[in-house]
Image (cartoon, coloured by chain):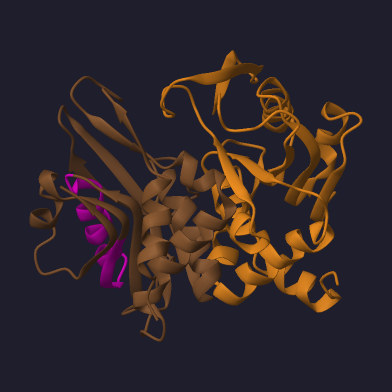
Chain colours: A orange, B brown
Amino acid sequence: MGPGETDLELIRSRIREVPDFPKKGIAFKDITPLLQDGHAFRKAVDAMAAPFEGRDLETICSAEARGFIFGAALSYRLGIGFAPVRKPGKLPPQTHTVSYSLEYGTDSLEIRQDALAKGEKVLLVDDVLATGGTMEACCRLVETAGGVVVACLFLIELAALGGREKLPGREIVSVLTYD
Amino acid sequence: MGPGETDLELIRSRIREVPDFPKKGIAFKDITPLLQDGHAFRKAVDAMAAPFEGRDLETICSAEARGFIFGAALSYRLGIGFAPVRKPGKLPPQTHTVSYSLEYGTDSLEIRQDALAKGEKVLLVDDVLATGGTMEACCRLVETAGGVVVACLFLIELAALGGREKLPGREIVSVLTYD
């Protein structure tokens, strides 16, 4: 069963908008009030898990650092493995690496080469879908490592930033959408 | 009830030693095989939770990034809030900051100023107790924010590095100890 309206209202009420962070013109969605409320945090994790109960999934992948919070809690909740995606040099060798574009320059992400078996079914998890750049890189990384991306799951989707367009053909699930 | 011997053997069997990482002479404890085994990861989180069932705790604090994995799963498991400790500039203002010494130079950690109520009872969580520098800084940060440190909880303790001596008077719990 999915989350009720009151659960979604509770979750939404615990997300605070911070104007001009991390820079001018950006309205940051601060999830720390949600995390600090143990009941609301559980409801948020349960709401993320609900669409995937009984689905054929083997592993959750999330990128550091905020992605680890929901990814690890969902891994515990669903009883499936967790494969962390990290910045370069943080995971012991051997790793696969992908690069992706930022507003200025590029960044890279890594996964352990033995993180996934061939064809392993992966649920990608992050807290926020913004422009989609990080998630698109995570999809490529999972596929480079031999895995299959089943879906991309977010707590929050910032629809105006068009992240879905960066992820064509992917199943995208988000608990809360903001215009 | 605490974890049985077979659970501890399972958990220990999923921790891989990586020689000379991140630099020569260090035998890195790689937890990725544990995370990738959903059953073993659950057992590890349950083993960390067991000594704290029914204890009077209000919030878990963990430092990014690996600390988020066990901290968030334990927060879900115990049904109490989670207050992330982050590198400078990652949390929206206002924050408290503490500095701590590294082998060369210093580093800083931050927590939201509204993360903890006065006297809030905090369980600090990390994956590994090594030299204790990060955890000692987290204790100071929690106390600066008005919280009370109930205990410091680790999956792994590297006893030879003397981390306990950096944390005098603290209750320290670790699931697995290595000489």
**Magenta part of the protein: which range?**
B131-153
Up the image or down, B62 lies above or below A143; here it is below
Say left or right for B29 vs A35. Answer: left
Image quadrant containing the N terminus of chain A: bottom right
Asked whether B16 or A123 is in front, the reply is B16
Residue under the image location 76 percent in, 75 percent down? A7
Q: Does B143 appear in magenta?
A: yes
Q: Tally the numbered discs.
A: 0
Residue at 36 percent across and 77 percent down: it is: B52
Residue plotted at (55% across, 64% down):
A35
The outermost residue toward the front is B6
The stretch drawn in magenta includes residue A70: no
Figure quadrant of residue A162: top right
Q: Is residue B90 visible?
A: no
Is B101 in front, or is A98?
A98
In x, y percent, where is residue A41? Answer: 61, 68
- Whether residue A13 is visible, yes or no, is yes
Q: What residue appears at the point 64 percent right and 67 percent down from the top-left corner?
A: A14
Give left or right: position of B105 versus A158: left
